Amino acid sequence: MKIACIPAFNAETTIGKVVKECLLHVDEVIVCDDGSRDKTGEIAEKNGAQVVRHEKNYGYGAALITLFDKAREKNADVMITLDADGQHIPDGIPSLIAPLSYPHVDVVVGSRFLSDASKTPAYRKMGIKIITATTNINSRLKLTDAQSGFRAYSLRAINEIHPTEYGMAASTEILTKVANKGLNIIEVPIVISYDNTDSKKHAFPQGIRVLMNVLKYLSIKHPIPSYGFPGIALIIIGTVLGIQFFDAYFNQGVLYTGTLFGAIITFLAGTILITTAILLFSMATLIREKNN
């Protein structure tokens, strides 16, 4: 069974068309109405979708959590995710899911940057590329579009992936889980439509939030370079400042209180970062040993 899963929030102007076009390519469409204040849910149902409702707006990731649960509940063989705002063109579903028939392909991501027809605005392209590069470092994948929500998942992937992030960072969290669980992922070219002005709102703050969450995963996965190395650098700086303070005090009789406070603060900050690195590294090692 092929199921199209659509997270939706206040998408009454586009959801009907998206649902109808999806039904031309899949067996069933499930829409998660994430606390919409308009008629998103009603319109989706009228156009043939099964609607799961959240009492309030929890976020994109929360909707994905619900949709993954529904896909498992229905024993779906293929799960396709796409946006409700019309950015993703449902006619691209056949080419998106085609690679799932190949041996050892578990996840397919539609990349706007593999298509010559991509008309991604420059500001959006730059932000996506920064997030993608950071995600690739964290997950050791080689993707061109880590922020694409137009994806297809095999039965194995549906059962293995359990998102936990409630916000937009769920997209990168899923990719991290794909890498951690050894699932095989490929990209195919897609065309994105930016005609809907709603998709352009708050792009910059949203991108910052996603990037910060990616960095969070990166720091947890690689605590030594993320916390340990900066900690060592701060301790060295604190030590140098301390030597300068004592040298001035004993040799010149001058009391540089600013230098003293700087030495104490940087030394303590470095100690905290190194302790954090050791704790996170120990926890990560224990978790890996337990899973193995």
Image (cartoon, helix red, strand yellow):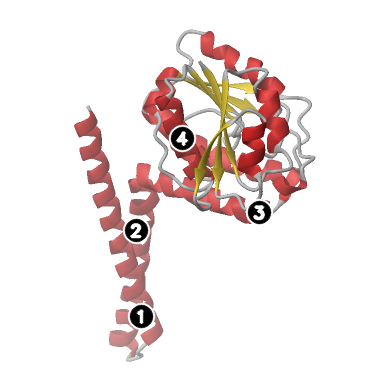
> Do labels 1 and 2 touch, CB within 8 Å?
no
> Do labels 1 and 4 touch, CB within 8 Å?
no
Residue 136 horizontal/vertical position (percent): 51, 34
Q: What distance separates the C-alpha of mark 1 from that of mark 2?
A: 17 Å
Q: Amino acid at mark 3?
A: Phe
Q: What distance separates the C-alpha of mark 3 from that of mark 2?
A: 31 Å
The residue identified by callout 3 is 204
Left or right of 49 on screen, residue 74 = left
Where is 96 relative to 253, above or below? above
Q: What distance separates the C-alpha of mark 4 from that of mark 3?
A: 22 Å
Q: Nearer the viewer, mark 1 or mark 3?
A: 3
Q: Which mark is residue 261?
A: 1
Which residue is pictured at 54% across the width and 48% down the height?
210
The residue identified by callout 4 is 174
Task: Answer few, some or many: residues within 10 Å of disc 3's Cα (few below 14, many 20 plus, some between 14 and 19).
Answer: few
Q: What distance separates the C-alpha of mark 1 from that of mark 4?
A: 44 Å
Whichever of callouts 1 and 2 sits on the residue coming sooner in the sequence is: 2
Q: Amino acid at mark 4?
A: Ile
SS of the residue under disc 2: helix
> Do labels 3 and 2 touch, CB within 8 Å?
no
Residue 15 horizontal/vertical position (percent): 68, 37
Whichever of callouts 3 and 2 sits on the residue coming sooner in the sequence is: 3
Q: Amino acid at mark 1?
A: Phe
Q: What distance separates the C-alpha of mark 2 from that of mark 4?
A: 30 Å
Residue 186 horizontal/vertical position (percent): 54, 20
Whichever of callouts 4 and 3 sits on the residue coming sooner in the sequence is: 4
> Do labels 4 and 3 touch, CB within 8 Å?
no
